[in-house]
Amino acid sequence: MGRDIDIEVRHLTRVEGHGNIYLNARSGKVEKVLWEVDEAPRFFEAMVRGKSYHQLSHITSRICGICSISHSLASLKATEAAMGVEISKQTELLRRLALYGENLQSHTLHVGYLVAPDLLGAGSVIPLVKTAKEAVVKIVGLHRTANMLSEAICGRATHPITLEVGGFTEIPTERALLGMREELENAKGVCTDVAGVVLAHADRLPDFTRETEFIALTNDENYAFYDGDLGSTDGGRWPVEEYLSITNEYVVPHSTAKYTRHNRESYMVGALARFNLNHAMLSKEAMEVAGMFGLKPVCHNPFMNNVAQLVEIMDSLVDSIGIIDELLDRGLEEESGEIEVRAGRGVGAVHAPRGLLIHDYTIDGLGNCTKANCIIPTNQNHANIQKDMEELAPAIIDKPAKEIELTLEMLVRAYDPCISCSTHYIDVNFR
Amino acid sequence: MKPRVAFFDFASCEGCQLQVINLEEKILDLIDVVEVVSFREAMKESSDDYDIAFVEGSIMRPMDEERLKRIRKNARILVALGACACIGGVNRLRNEWSVDEVKKEVYDEADIEGNRLFDVFPTKAVDEVVDVDFRIPGCPINREEFAKVVAHLAIGKEPRLPSYPVCVECKKNENICVFELGKFCLGPVTRAGCNAICPTHGDGCEGCRGYLDDPRMEAAKDVLRKYGVSFDEMMKRFNMFNYRKGAI
């Protein structure tokens, strides 16, 4: 005989933004399981209308504190595409470094501060300061290195200052890059140590698999973060301008929710999607981290997104060092170029830490934005989270209620949702 | 006894709470002097028994107002954290239009009528709903300033914000005035405390820390006229973090 279970997690903790989990089971049968988001809507796409091209990235970076650099860069790329502005190789390299700084920061925050407490059986990282001090100090150190990289390139880790249409207001000195290179080199060992801590508790990551589609940027030169086409593990490659045919936002009949779907009823974006699609471009060191956990493409266990993030931490460190070497070889030079205002529409896509991020702007002849659309990683994941929950909940329904609750929380956390990015968001009416 | 501290967030990017985490090793010192009892972004435990509440974000909905009033009732000291909480910040940009208009632009035909999650009013700063004891301004907050405010509050001292403009810090940093570089800057009317971080990195101040108590607006406008900034451009710049309908 099954039990009746009612679970309600209001304002799930250790995620960015506000979301709720509900589960009702009667006689051991799951009647309803739901992931609901009740973040206050902020209407960014409405507020950028009439703003000047040079303000857009500064406004839209405020969509998200954790991924403000990705938002800035998606915004700048969309603006530059709309106005036909070209950027230099140096600018592209520096922007890639900025993205890596943010990816390192965000992934370390997620794996180290938000997920590790579940694995180590704590409510937060604070008690771990006493019980697992060595691990905490390593995580904090890695987080600091990541922010140093963002600060060196962007002037500030959150809400970047130096990134502007066409280039940079200020570029780092060679000395700063050399210092950064040493920091990153040291961080590789720390990354391996942190991966070791996670590995020691990896048996707590549920063994759960549900086949789904993974979508990510992909290119033939590198592990795509800054640039690429849209790619799918179900096959296919499309220019980013065709994003609307991939993201297919839709509203489900019983709610106002905007979901996305492509080939199947849902798809996933983020570290695991990138790993599944672009693993061939990973560095040897990153593949070693994947090997520690036996992570192989195509992996359909969403909990392994945490592991894919560890793999990417290593890869971002290795690739950042490579970019710094390339910049130093080339020699840094001050650049300045006049921006010519031109009317047009442009799409800019980058990988935020949590996955595919797209900004789409229309700009008029005076350089003002007339229409904006932003496609946020977490919005693309909501439907996949929901589908995972629907399959996971019945499989664990005989476990103690507390364990069911924790497992569902861990599932949502594994996606590293970033709910403040609420330009579009899900809402479901629940009894 | 250590003061009990709680963090809360409303409509925002949560970047200000992130600055608390970005204190890195210094957090370990801070948790020596205060006890963190609620911090949803970083911890599972929570409690309604706290002395100091840090509130990030703007207030958008009746349901947010109710929650904020409960926080005010529980807290001995309420600190507004960041531009969204202190002045409305970029969230206030949408107040240029009616609520119905912005809903239509973003959610288009989706049926959100009568749904309380979408029941929004024009953006408000925290002090438009409840009394605020102290403010830590900025977008994002300056984490050093945050640490200083916490240290003050922990020993029962009143934290004070600088009463001089960003220009003072900018001069101290020996920067070339960004107006001379052909850029725009709100440094002359904006409260210091950020160490002039934007002008120091080659970009003009955007006024995210809010205006001084008694800003010399007319003098600032004269400067802008001198450098040939158009009225339209000036309004856009002034409005970025400090939007007031039909006024500067």
Image: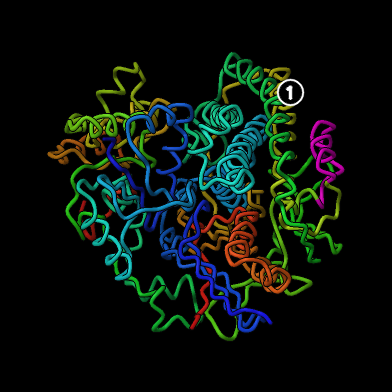
Q: Does the magenta segment cover residue A288?
A: yes
Q: Is residue A267 above or below residue B46?
A: below
The residue most toward the bottom is A253
Quarter-wise, where is residue B198 in the image?
Answer: top left
Crowding near pointer 1: few (<14 within 10 Å), some, many (20+)?
A: few
Q: Does the magenta segment cover residue B247?
A: no
Q: Is residue A218 above or below residue A364?
A: above
Q: Which residue is mark 1?
A: A326
Image side of residue B59 versus residue A349, left or right: left
Q: Which residues are magenta?
A: A276-294
Quarter-wise, where is residue A167 in the image?
Answer: top right
Of A194 and A149, the residue lying toward us? A194
Camera sees residue A85: no
Of B215 and B67, the residue lying toward us? B67
Image side of residue A118 versus residue A50, left or right: right
Camera sees residue B48: yes
Q: Position of residue B183 (x, y in %)?
A: 38, 34
- Chain letter, disc 1 residue: A
Quarter-wise, where is residue A375 in the image?
Answer: bottom right
Figure quadrant of the N terminus of chain B: top left
